[in-house]
């Protein structure tokens, strides 16, 4: 087995050339300017092992972004590999429309045991975008079937500027990143938008230590004015990921929840990025004892193995969809691969590792090591801000530190730092000029030091 595997990597120079040629000819990469792509060195991943990915030439790279934030326990975790193989010997997939399946039942039970209190029901889908869309549709339909006709006016969603909830059109509607979402305006449904706290570039010009989260006033006013038409608020708890690792000050999330409760607006927590341990607790809402009405999870759910998502909700919301069939309270939503058996088996194994290995407890010293190692970045001439929440890190590069002026987008500074890091054996993917560090949880303290050293040196040499 082992020999056969090793014999496959590295590939021959001819094989590699043929692969690159075919990639350039046929594969359209996500979030990628393809004109730039075909001019860059093409790294093709062939294998993974723990915190490393290995390319077709056999070079090893420390995976500093957990394969775009999804990998949790490392690549090729025996327990997850075995769980998928065992499931494969039974069945790869069977539909949840009209039949149930063993792994999807077991997984739902396990998720609910660990999920924030009050969440009791699991609706499966395939990815973060669909998990958010499911939450939006449930929230909308919930009010439409409300017994009080006045409540049926609650149709509008509140979301945040610079939010990212995925790339399907419903998720784009509640998104707020102009570069990604701006063009699609005419295709989207209208949403009420408020600002997320951005303490580095505070719109009110206040210092975060003494602001009392004054930026909440905007949401407060909106709710007071329009609560009777507001169905739900969707938020990335604690950290706006894709926006550039923007981190809300402590108390913000709790205050948002309080406003939602006061004005009878459902709270949707998009934990697609922050869920499953990323912020240092199993779920981000746990940190402020917040109890969302709906919670979307995806990325880390299967340990980074297979596409699977879940939208969790409460008993009262679930019950609002019950009734005789002809009342049409059914939630008419589902995907071909909803609750896929292989993905559910992988997720179950991943969740079991959290429980068996005390993953969250073991992560705490690593979070501290990251924090220590990040301190020296603050003194760099072109590092404007260093943000960390648990195992999510954003290092913002700026052209001018005192005025916080960004580099021109065309300079591609973040991308250049990432390309330089790759030459030093570290795989990074920035968000604009924000360097993102989001390693798998099995990374060792020494590997954390390497990740930081390489990032530090590459920032210094490029800026
Ligand atoms: C990645 C992400 C999504 C979208 O998930 P996909 O699986 O890429 O569709 C939604 N919300 C947040 C916060 C994300 O980070």
Image (spheres, helix red, strand yellow):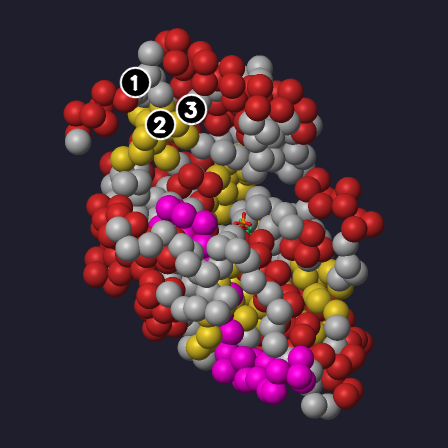
Disc 2 and disc 3: Cα gap in Å? 6 Å
Q: Secondary structure at mark 3?
A: loop
Say whether disc 1 or disc 2 marks the residue closer to the N-terminus.
Answer: 1
Q: Alpha-carbon neighbours of circle 1 within 10 Å: few (<14), some, or many (≥20)?
A: some
Instruction: List the single residue furthest toward the right.
Output: 186
Q: Residue furthest top?
A: 14
Q: Where does residue 393 sit, x and y in percent of width and height?
A: 45, 45
Residue at x-position 64% and y-position 27%: 33
Question: Total number of numbered labels?
Answer: 3
Marks 1 and 2, how far apart in space? 9 Å
Residue 305, numbered circle = none
- Residue 45 horizontal/vertical position (percent): 39, 27
Q: Position of residue 451 (x, y in %)?
A: 35, 33
Relative height, residue 51 to residue 89 (above, below): above
Q: Which of the image's four quarters has the C terminus?
A: top right
* Crowding at mark 2 (Cα within 10 Å: few <14, some 14-19, many 20+): some
Single out the residue that lies furthest toward the bottom.
Answer: 148
Q: Which residue does the numbered mark 3 point to in the structure image?
A: 44
Decide if residue 257 is on the left or right side of residue 375.
right
Residue hosting label 2: 46
Q: Residue at x 21, y 57 (%)?
A: 357
Q: In the rendered structure, which segment of residues is drawn in magenta?
A: 300-328
Q: Callout 2: helix, strand or loop?
A: strand
Residue named by callout 1: 10
Using the numbered discs, state the Cα–Cα distance from disc 3 to disc 1 in whole angstroms: 11 Å
Cβ–Cβ under 8 Å for marks 1 and 2: yes
Callout 2 touching callout 3 (CB < 8 Å): yes
């Amino acid at each position: 087995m082992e020999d056969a595997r090793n014999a496959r990597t590295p590939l021959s120079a001819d094989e590699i050339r043929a692969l690159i040629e075919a990639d350039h000819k046929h594969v359209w990469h996500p979030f990628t300017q393809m004109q730039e792509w075909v001019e860059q060195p093409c790294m093709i991943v062939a294998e993974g092992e723990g915190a490393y990915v290995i390319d077709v030439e056999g070079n090893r790279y420390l995976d500093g972004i957990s394969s775009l934030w999804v990998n949790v326990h490392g690549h090729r975790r025996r327990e997850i590999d075995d769980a998928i193989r065992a499931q494969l010997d039974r069945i790869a997939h069977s539909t949840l429309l009209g039949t149930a399946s063993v792994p999807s039942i077991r997984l739902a039970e396990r998720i609910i045991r660990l999920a924030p209190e009050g969440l009791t029901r699991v609706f499966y889908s395939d990815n973060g975008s669909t998990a958010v869309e499911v939450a939006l549709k449930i929230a909308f339909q919930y009010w439409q079937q409300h017994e009080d006709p006045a409540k049926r006016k609650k149709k509008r969603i509140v979301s945040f500027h610079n939010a990212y909830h995925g790339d399907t059109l419903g998720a784009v509607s509640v998104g707020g990143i102009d570069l990604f979402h701006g063009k699609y305006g005419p295709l989207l449904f209208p949403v009420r938008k408020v600002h997320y706290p951005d303490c580095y570039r505070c719109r009110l010009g206040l210092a975060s230590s003494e602001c009392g989260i004054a930026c909440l006033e905007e949401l407060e006013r909106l709710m007071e004015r329009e609560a009777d038409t507001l169905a739900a608020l969707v938020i990335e708890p604690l950290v706006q990921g894709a926006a550039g690792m923007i981190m809300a000050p402590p108390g913000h999330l709790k205050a948002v929840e309080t406003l939602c409760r006061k004005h009878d607006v459902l709270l949707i927590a998009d934990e697609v990025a922050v869920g499953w341990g990323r912020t240092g607790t199993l779920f981000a809402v746990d940190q402020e004892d917040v109890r969302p009405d709906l919670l979307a999870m995806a990325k880390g759910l299967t340990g980074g193995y297979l596409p699977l998502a879940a939208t969790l909700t409460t008993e009262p919301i679930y019950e609002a969809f019950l009734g005789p069939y002809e009342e049409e309270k059914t939630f008419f939503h589902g995907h071909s691969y909803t609750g896929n058996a292989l993905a559910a088996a992988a997720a179950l194994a991943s969740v079991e590792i959290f429980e068996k290995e005390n993953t969250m407890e073991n992560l705490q010293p690593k979070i501290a090591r990251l924090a220590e190692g990040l301190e020296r970045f603050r003194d760099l001439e072109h590092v404007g801000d260093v943000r960390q929440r648990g195992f999510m890190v954003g290092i913002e590069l700026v052209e001018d530190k005192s005025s916080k002026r960004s580099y021109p987008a065309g300079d591609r500074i973040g991308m250049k730092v990432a390309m330089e890091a790759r030459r030093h054996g570290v795989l990074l993917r920035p968000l604009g000029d924000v360097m993102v560090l989001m390693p798998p949880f099995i990374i060792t303290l020494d590997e954390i030091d390497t990740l930081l050293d390489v990032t530090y040196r590459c920032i210094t040499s490029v800026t």
